[in-house]
Image: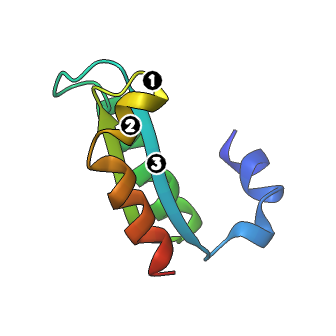
Amino acid sequence: MCHRFYSRTGKLHGKKSIMMATAYNSADWTMEALANHYETLVRYMEWQDVGQVWATGCGARSLVEKSSFADMAYKIGANL
């Protein structure tokens, strides 16, 4: 399957990447599988990871806005 993915993503190879994800659950394992998958893609695509925001405990926009996660995302974007 990876060869099919790579054949369609040549223009994305070697680019910058950002991971931003939200989840209602705030358990320490909530983002584990997604984080592992993202790290695999970063390595495979030779992306430069420029930031990650793992907004756990934020199952609604209002919860994100009241948290520090929105500021984290803004700072990452401002530094691009």
Describe residue 75's horizontal placement relative to residue 1 as left or right. left
- Residue at 39% over, 51% down: 70
Position of the N terminus by quadrant: top right
Mark 3 or mark 2: which comes first in sequence?
3
**Residue where numbered disc 2 is placed:** 64
Q: CA distance from mark 3 to mark 2?
A: 12 Å
Q: Residue most toward the right?
A: 8
Describe residue 71's horizontal placement relative to residue 38 as left or right. left
Mark 3 or mark 1: which comes first in sequence?
3
- Residue at 51% over, 81% down: 80
**Residue where numbered disc 1 is placed:** 60
Residue neighbourhood size for the residue with mark 3, other residues' Cα within 10 Å, grouped as few (<14), some (14–19), many (≥20): few
x%, y% of residue 17?
Answer: 53, 65
**Can I make out residue 18 in this image?**
yes
Residue type at mark 2 is Val
Residue in the foreground of this view, choosing between 65 and 16 = 65
Residue in the foreground of this view, choosing between 46 and 76 = 76
x%, y% of residue 59?
Answer: 40, 21
x%, y% of residue 23?
Answer: 38, 26
At mark 3, the secondary structure is strand
At mark 1, the secondary structure is loop
Residue type at mark 3 is Met
Residue in the foreground of this view, choosing between 14 and 3 = 14
Q: CA distance from mark 3 to mark 1?
A: 14 Å
**Can I make out residue 50 in this image?**
no
Residue type at mark 1 is Ala
